[in-house]
């Protein structure tokens, strides 16, 4: 199947969840041995999952995080603190289990998949690396479109493929993250295009930019928006003009998760830019998205508003790699466990079912 | 050893952590393959643990949550939504693995211990229940002291004993929670006494109080403060006059955790009232405390200020049982895993060590 047809056949598979399942889940929550509403957002998570799975009895199996890596032509503008070679170096670090996401995934019992969507450096064939190299990085979007439309659809297709594979593997909870030196600048450009906000509002320090690099980042976003102004009317064109290969893949991953009716956790700012593009392509993607955490990147909250999600965690993180998703996955698992495995007032012989039922 | 001597021999064992270990941990963080500071509060957690363990190489082993149950004489004032019998019914539910804390502990691989510090109903001997029944609940503190000093010291001793046992069992991360119908009123009275704030400011809806019950709760707290006004000058006397058996035990558990140099996670409002009393008894207890989450009980934030901790989670929960501690435990485990198992820039061959070192 070509990337193009993968994209076009996936969109119509996405359907909004059936709200009546959420109501059934809410009614079930009142039967469980706790004061009504006392598990707060854990109840909201479980109720949303019930609507996604159309069931009151489901489980988190094979939770999986997919990390998409690629490089960015905009690095030519000097927007990056770390040298571009770090993208591939960090991917090798992932494959050696040495990065933060490896530690968090291992601590959390989470499967990790690493995908090269288009790094500047080509790595040799490595078993654990899923090589789907669309291009050797994007072009510099300050001067030309970042990708061709074919490359963009191919990148989206990589994400859809990974979601389809996860569904086929029996994963029932997905998360995603990214690695790509320079990609906060790309995400800032996309955020500006998606929200209409100006470059300075949605551009942050990324890996730790100083004033000089910050000025370059904002300047690069402003130039990108000016150069491509007439073509930024659709989410697909935004990706073509000012996107990133891994961001396209993450967009596709969200589309694919929704098409397969699987809950999916976004990570930080860059990951959420992919999710926001997917929501723009199909608003029902929102029903499957959970926002893992609130990044300290200033553009993140605007993207979270676009995808209509309140983050589960606020730990002042700004690393990416899927680290926020890995932490939030444990909350989703806990929420599902409580919802599906708690005793009811009746089964446990605990007084108060009538109080619980009456209080909401 | 008598309870009294357990208390008096534990206090001098508590020592403030050595801040130089925190600095060594901060320096180590800069060597790990991530932008400096990018793991946010996970770095703070790990650095604090390094100071507690006086090591840069430690692990979370046998994470354990201890739940303390007891009843409250103030229930005679009609402050409780659920009947008092629910305390023992819920303890039986815990022992049958049917409560929320069971689900969260199971999902998180956390050991759970259940302690009866003084429920009104006496349960038959049950293997999984640690029976340390000091009294059949407290007395109604609106008319008389909740406990004798001997009962109070016995309750504190139960908590110390559980912390000592956890240390002997090789647990390196502790949490605690509670079950006790009516105990939000007790925690509100203690919070008012500890902070000087008025009853209405620190009293909330607990399990779901309506306006009538809310008025009774506030009234009960006001009367308790008036009746015992002259005796509320020390944390021990606060426990005697307006405390709870499980709150005394949680206070003791915090003292014991600190004495054994173990990090310990508080849970919600009631658990934190025990932690705050422990901090009042020995300020260095603060160094060992981590606040799991922010409860929606209005008094909680004032107690968090007293113990000097910012909560890790804000999930709008208000259940108790140690549920917040169970969720936050996974964050501490993740933080420790990242700190102790990540590659360094040098070991992974990733460029940027000099950037990392220079950015802070």
Image (tube, coloured by chain):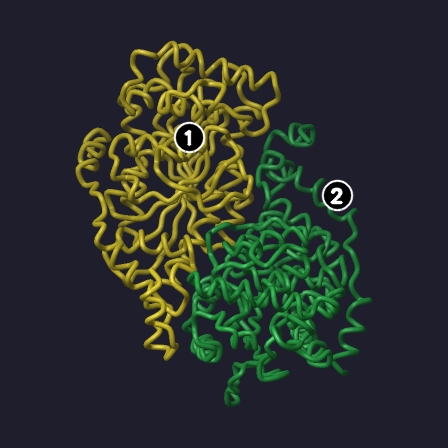
Chain colours: A yellow, B green
Name the residue beneath numbered marker 1: A302
Label 1 SS: helix
Query: Of B230 and A219, which appears nearest the observer?
Result: B230
Query: Of B139 and A143, which appears nearest the observer?
Result: B139
Looking at the image, residue A7 lies above or below residue B119: above
Looking at the image, residue B67 lies above or below residue A206: below
Where residue A257 appears, x then y in whole percent? 29, 43
Q: Give the residue displayed 60% in from the left and 73% down from the top.
A: B142
| Residue located farthest toward the bottom when viewing the structure as drawn | B124
Where residue A231 appears, x then y in whole percent? 29, 14
Name the residue beneath numbered marker 2: B23
Viewport quadrant of the N terminus of chain B:
bottom right
Judge depth for marks 2 and 1 and give the one in front.
1
Q: Give the residue displayed 32% in from the left and 53% down from the top.
A: A172
Residue B221 seen:
yes
Where residue A68 appears, x then y in whole percent? 41, 36
Number of dots carrying numbers = 2
Q: Chain of mark 1?
A: A
Looking at the image, residue A70 lies above or below residue B163: above
Label 2 SS: helix
Residue B175 seen:
no
Q: Give the residue displayed 80% in from the left and 73% down from the top.
A: B8
Kindly report the distance in space between the C-alpha atoms of the residues bearing marks 2 and 1: 36 Å
* Left or right, residue A175 beside residue B349: left
Disc 2 and disc 1 on one polypeptide chain = no
* Left or right, residue B100 beside residue B238: left
Query: Of B121 and B116, which appears nearest the observer?
Result: B121
Looking at the image, residue B20 lies above or below residue B217: above
């Amino acid at each position: 199947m070509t990337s193009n047809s993968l994209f076009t056949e996936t969109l119509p598979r996405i359907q909004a969840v059936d709200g009546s399942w959420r109501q059934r889940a809410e009614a079930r929550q009142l039967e469980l041995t706790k004061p009504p509403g006392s598990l707060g957002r854990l109840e909201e998570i479980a109720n949303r999952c019930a609507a996604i799975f159309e069931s009151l009895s489901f489980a988190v199996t094979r939770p999986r995080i997919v990390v998409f890596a690629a490089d960015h032509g905009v690095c030519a503008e000097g927007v990056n603190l770390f040298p571009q070679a770090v993208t591939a170096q960090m991917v090798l670090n992932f494959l050696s289990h040495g990065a933060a996401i490896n530690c968090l995934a291992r601590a959390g019992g989470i499967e990790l998949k690493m995908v090269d969507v288009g790094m500047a450096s080509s790595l040799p064939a490595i078993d654990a690396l899923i090589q789907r190299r669309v291009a050797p990085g994007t072009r510099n979007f300050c001067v030309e479109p970042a990708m061709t439309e074919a490359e963009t659809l191919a990148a989206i297709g990589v994400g859809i493929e990974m979601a389809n594979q996860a569904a086929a593997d029996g994963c029932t909870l997905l998360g995603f993250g990214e690695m790509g030196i320079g990609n906060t600048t790309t995400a800032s450009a996309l955020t500006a295009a998606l929200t209409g906000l100006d470059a300075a509002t949605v551009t942050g320090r990324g890996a730790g930019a100083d004033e000089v690099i910050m000025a370059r980042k904002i300047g690069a976003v402003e130039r990108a928006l000016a150069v491509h102004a007439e073509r930024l009317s659709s989410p697909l064109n935004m990706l073509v003009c000012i996107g990133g290969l891994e961001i396209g893949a993450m967009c596709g991953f969200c589309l694919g998760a929704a098409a397969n009716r699987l809950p999916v956790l976004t990570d930080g700012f860059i990951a959420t830019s992919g999710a926001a593009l997917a929501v723009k392509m199909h608003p029902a993607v929102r029903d499957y998205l959970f926002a893992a955490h609130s990044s300290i990147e200033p553009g993140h909250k605007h993207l979270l508003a676009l995808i209509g999600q309140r983050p589960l965690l606020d730990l002042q993180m700004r690393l990416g790699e899927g680290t926020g998703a890995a932490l939030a996955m444990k909350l989703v698992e806990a929420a599902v466990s409580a919802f599906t495995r708690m005793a009811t007032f009746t089964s446990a012989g605990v007084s108060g079912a009538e109080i619980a039922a009456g209080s909401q």
